[in-house]
Each structure stands twice: as structure tokens, then as C-alpha cells.
Image: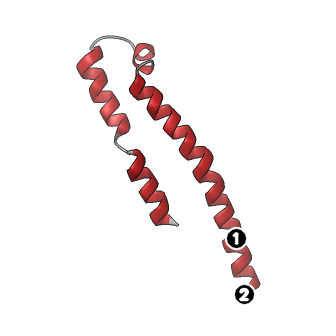
């Protein structure tokens, strides 16, 4: 299960906030944070974060529940 989670994070790009910050520094210069949030990169990052949270967390809770049932039934 951990390999799946690691694969998801690597596939979705853990360095996306770093890339967005570098892009902000290069392109936007002295503009404020609200302007930066409107860029496409930040929108992609926020959408991906929501999708990961919505799909991964219930899957982890379900796997935890199933593992608990399996371990309790074996004793």
C-alpha cells in the first residue's frame, strides 16, 4: 500500500510547489500572492491536491478498516 502512495506522490509531482515558487520569482517579480494564485500552475497544484486528498484518504481508511478486520478475525 505504501508503494502505491509513494508512486502517486511521485507521479503527481512533489516538487510542484517548488516549481511554482521558482516560476513566481522568475515571472511575477514583485506582484502579490493573490496574483500568483491565479496562475495556471497554482490552479493545477490545488486541483491535484484536492483529487489526491479525495481519492487517497478514503482508500487509506478503507485499507485500515479491512486490515483491522483481517487481523481481528485471525486471533
Q: In this view, does 67 lie to the left or right of 49?
A: right
Residue in the picture at 70% in, 70% down:
66
Residue farthest left in this picture = 26
Instruction: Please give the count of numbered marks on the rendered protein.
Output: 2
Instruction: Looking at the picture, tell me which residue is in the foreground, 55 or 28.
Output: 55
Label 1 and label 2: CA atoms lie apart by 12 Å
Q: In this view, does 34 lie above or below 56?
A: above
Residue 1 in percent (x, y) is at 52, 67
Assess disc 2: are there few (<14), some (14-19) or many (≥20) residues with their C-alpha within 10 Å of its C-alpha: few
* Nearer-N-terminus badge (1/2): 1
Residue in the picture at 38% in, 52% down:
10
Q: In this view, does 39 lie to the left or right of 53?
A: left
Which residue position is annotated with label 2? 74
Please say which color scheme the image uses.
secondary structure
Question: The C terminus is located in which quarter?
Answer: bottom right
Residue 20 in percent (x, y) is at 34, 30
- SS under mark 1: helix
Residue in the picture at 39% in, 18% down:
36
- Rendered image quadrant of residue 59: bottom right
Which numbered tag is attached to residue 53? none
Mark 1–mark 2 CB contact (< 8 Å):
no
Residue 34 in percent (x, y) is at 45, 15
Assess disc 1: are there few (<14), some (14-19) or many (≥20) residues with their C-alpha within 10 Å of its C-alpha: few
Residue farthest bottom in this picture = 75
Q: In this view, does 57 lie above or below 4?
A: above
Which residue position is annotated with label 1? 66
Q: Is residue 19 above or below residue 35?
A: below
Residue in the picture at 72% in, 87% down:
74
- SS under mark 2: loop
Residue 24 in percent (x, y) is at 31, 22
Amino acid at each position: 500500500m505504501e508503494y502505491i502512495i509513494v508512486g502517486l506522490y511521485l507521479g503527481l509531482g512533489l516538487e510542484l510547489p517548488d516549481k511554482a515558487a521558482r516560476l513566481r520569482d522568475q515571472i511575477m517579480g514583485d506582484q502579490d500572492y493573490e496574483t500568483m494564485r491565479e496562475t495556471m500552475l497554482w490552479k493545477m497544484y490545488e486541483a491535484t491536491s484536492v483529487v489526491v486528498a479525495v481519492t487517497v484518504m478514503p482508500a487509506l481508511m478503507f485499507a485500515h478498516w479491512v486490515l483491522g478486520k483481517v487481523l481481528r478475525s485471525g486471533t
